[in-house]
């Protein structure tokens, strides 16, 4: 079954997340903190992911890897372009 946008939302409109946060403002703050820390880690490691994949900026698939690395701790859907 193909997912639609509403499948990713809680009843109050806040994105579903791995942390169980239901308040949009709190989720936004946590998402910002986590993604900023992960981006700094990525930069310090010269864009080498923990699985030893070196990001080059030459492949569109790297966007999925970056998204998963930055937001995977917060959202289970981070990374894939789509899910069925």
Image: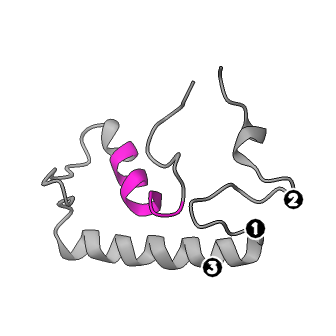
Q: Using the numbered discs, state the Cα–Cα distance from disc 2 to disc 1 in whole angstroms.
A: 8 Å
Q: Name the residue under label 3.
A: 29
Among the 4 quarters of the image, the one containing residue 50: bottom left
**Residue 56 part of the magenta segment:** no
**Figure quadrant of the C terminus:** top right
**Figure quadrant of the N terminus:** top right
Q: Earlier in the sequence, mark 2 or mark 3?
A: 2
Q: Earlier in the sequence, mark 2 or mark 1?
A: 2
Residue at coordinates 44% horizontally, 57% vertically from top-left?
72
Q: Which colour scheme is used?
A: one colour
- Is the C-beta separation of discs 2 and 3 under 8 Å? no
Task: Please tell me whether mark 1 sits on a helix, a strand or a loop.
Answer: loop
Q: Earlier in the sequence, mark 3 or mark 1?
A: 1
Towards the viewer: 43 or 84: 84
Q: Name the residue under label 2.
A: 12
Q: Is the magenta stretch mostly helix, strand or loop?
A: helix
Give the image location of residue 58, x and y in percent. 24, 41
Q: Using the numbered discs, state the Cα–Cα distance from disc 2 to disc 3 in whole angstroms.
A: 17 Å
* Magenta region: 64-74
Give the image location of residue 29, x and y in percent. 63, 79
Task: Please tell me whether mark 3 sits on a helix, a strand or a loop.
Answer: helix
- Is the C-beta separation of discs 2 and 1 under 8 Å? yes
**Residue 72 part of the magenta segment:** yes
Q: In this view, does 39 lie to the left or right of 84?
A: left
Q: Mark 1 points at which residue?
A: 22
Q: Is residue 28 left or right of residue 34?
A: right
Q: Using the numbered discs, state the Cα–Cα distance from disc 3 to disc 1 in whole angstroms.
A: 12 Å
Towards the viewer: 14 or 61: 14
Q: Which residue lies furthest to the top in this view?
A: 1
Nearest-to-viewer mark from 2 and 3 = 2
């Amino acid at each position: 079954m193909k997912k639609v946008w509403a499948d990713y939302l809680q009843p109050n409109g806040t994105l579903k997340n791995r942390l169980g946060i239901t308040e949009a403002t709190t989720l936004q703050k946590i998402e910002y903190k986590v993604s900023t820390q992960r981006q700094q880690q990525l930069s310090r490691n010269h864009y080498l992911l923990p699985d030893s994949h070196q990001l080059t900026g030459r492949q569109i698939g790297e966007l999925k890897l970056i998204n998963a690395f930055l937001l995977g701790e917060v959202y289970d859907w981070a990374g894939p372009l789509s899910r069925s």
